[in-house]
Amino acid sequence: VAAGKYTENIVVPKENLALKGASGTLPENVVIEAPNSTGYVVSTGEADYFTIEGFTLQGGLNQGSNSFGASGLFANSGSTSKRLDITARNLIVKNNAHGIQIVSFNSGSITVEKNLITNNGFAGIQVSHNGSSAVLNVKNNTIANNTGVYGGYYDGGAIVGDTRVFRNNIFANNSAGI
């Protein structure tokens, strides 16, 4: 995707897809903003094997008090029996209700790496209702200045047996920690 500002909600339409900013372009130069500041910026839907890289995702806000789905990147398989393999890399995720929201996947791997996740209203990263063979890798991120009750990282429903790996992340100035 070429440098510029794009105002839209993106739903990933199929599996095995990569959405990447133009080669050599900084993420701050390829901006996707939700229209009318409602809902998600990018939703993976039930698409498996999805990579998003090299963008700024902003403006995924909510109407009212329900923040479900209001995020820069919303990964929701719709069922804890669904496998998801998603990579979010080299992103700036800012000014959303949740920066990255990951919900209801049973197996697979979610990798969140080399991102700046900042100034989100509920949580930088929020994870919930995932299955027993799900793996979350969070590495080399700066997660800062996220406000609200959840702060930097919130895990609201891990099932015994799934795995969370955190490496080389900076958590700073969030209203709550991990």
Image (cartoon, helix red, strand yellow):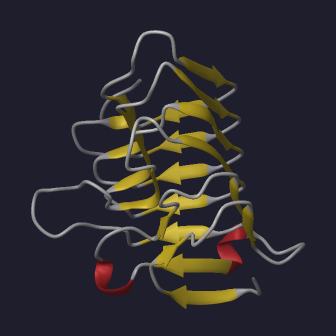
- Seen from the viewer's position, the closer of residues 10 and 153 is 10
Q: Position of residue 161 (x, y in %)?
A: 50, 10
Which quadrant of the figure contains the N terminus? bottom right
Is residue 136 or residue 176 the one in the foreground?
Answer: 136
Position above or below: 48 against 81? below
Q: Residue furthest right?
A: 24
Residue 80: x percent and y percent?
41, 35
Q: Is residue 168 above or below residue 43?
A: above
Most distant residue in the top direction: 160
| Residue 76 in the image, given as x and y percentages of width and height | 43, 50
> Is 89 left or right of 96, judged from the image as shown?
right
| Vertical comparison of 11 with 87: above or below | below
Quarter of the figure with the C terminus = top left
Total residue callouts: 0
Question: Could you tell me residue 90's position as x and y percent?
Answer: 72, 55
Residue 50: quarter of image: bottom right
Residue at position x 56%, y 17% from top?
Answer: 163
Quadrant of the rendered structure where residue 41 is? bottom left
Name the residue at 39% across, 67% down. 40
Q: Residue furthest left?
A: 64
Of 110 and 148, nearer the camera is 110
Side of 43 where 29 appears, left or right: right
Is 144 left, or right, of 47 in this rendering?
Answer: left
Residue 38, placed above or below residue 83: below
* Residue ID at (52%, 17%): 162
Task: Residue at 45%, 25% (x, y): give it.
Answer: 131
